[in-house]
Amino acid sequence: MSSDTSGSGYETPTGVPSKKQKRKYSQKYSKSWENDEEFKKWLKSSKKSANFAYCGVCKVDLTIQAGKTDLRKHANSKKHKENCVVVSRQPSVFDMPGSIRKQKETDAVKTGQASQAPTPLPDSVAVP
Ligand SMILES: [Zn+2]
């Protein structure tokens, strides 16, 4: 058997191009993260799979391949911070009772005027 590599173009066909990208350490959701001060306000388990976490404030699923690092990254994102502010100051329906009362008052005044002051008849003038 003489195997000289003399340009016959013989290559081994490899059907799997990216063998190396298999990561063993992809994180899974941990319930204990929900007790973490940093995340407890918004962190929930995702319905997608254990490879996701869910942000109850932004209402998005987060990939958690890097575990808490990914959660922290999301927590520091501008979008998340903005959403946090919105959620923490939900305006109540009874926030401005003043405007409603005012409207009622003006209504009362209007109707009061109409019933209390009937158009005075000019009976002392129209005598020919
Ligand atoms: Zn968020």
Image (cartoon, helix red, strand yellow):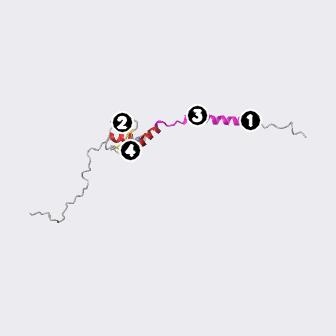
As measured in the structure, the alpha-carbon distance from the residue carrying label 1 to the one carrying label 3 is 27 Å
User: Sequence-wise, which precedes: disc 2 or disc 1?
Assistant: 2
User: Sequence-wise, which precedes: disc 2 or disc 4?
Assistant: 2
User: Sequence-wise, which precedes: disc 3 or disc 4?
Assistant: 4
Residue 11 picture quarter: bottom left
Q: Secondary structure at mark 3?
A: helix
Residue type, mark 1 in image: Ser
Residue type, mark 4 in image: Asp
Q: Are marks 3 and 4 in contact (CB under 8 Å)?
A: no
Residue type, mark 2 in image: Glu
Give the residue number, with chain letter if any, for mark 2. 34
Give the residue number, with chain letter if any, for mark 3. 97
Q: Position of residue 88 (x, y in %)?
A: 46, 36
Of circles 1 and 3, the one toward us is 3
Q: Position of residue 67 (x, y in %)?
A: 32, 41
Residue type, mark 3 in image: Pro
As measured in the structure, the alpha-carbon distance from the residue carrying label 2 to the one carrying label 1 is 64 Å
Give the residue number, with chain letter if any, for mark 4. 61
Ligand 1 is in which quadrant of the figure? top left
Range drawn in magenta:
86-115
Q: Secondary structure at mark 4?
A: strand
Q: Secondary structure at mark 1?
A: helix
As measured in the structure, the alpha-carbon distance from the residue carrying label 4 to the one carrying label 1 is 63 Å
Give the residue number, with chain letter if any, for mark 1. 115
Crowdedness near tag 4: few (<14), some (14–19) or many (≥20) residues, C-alpha within 10 Å? some
User: Sequence-wise, which precedes: disc 1 or disc 3?
Assistant: 3
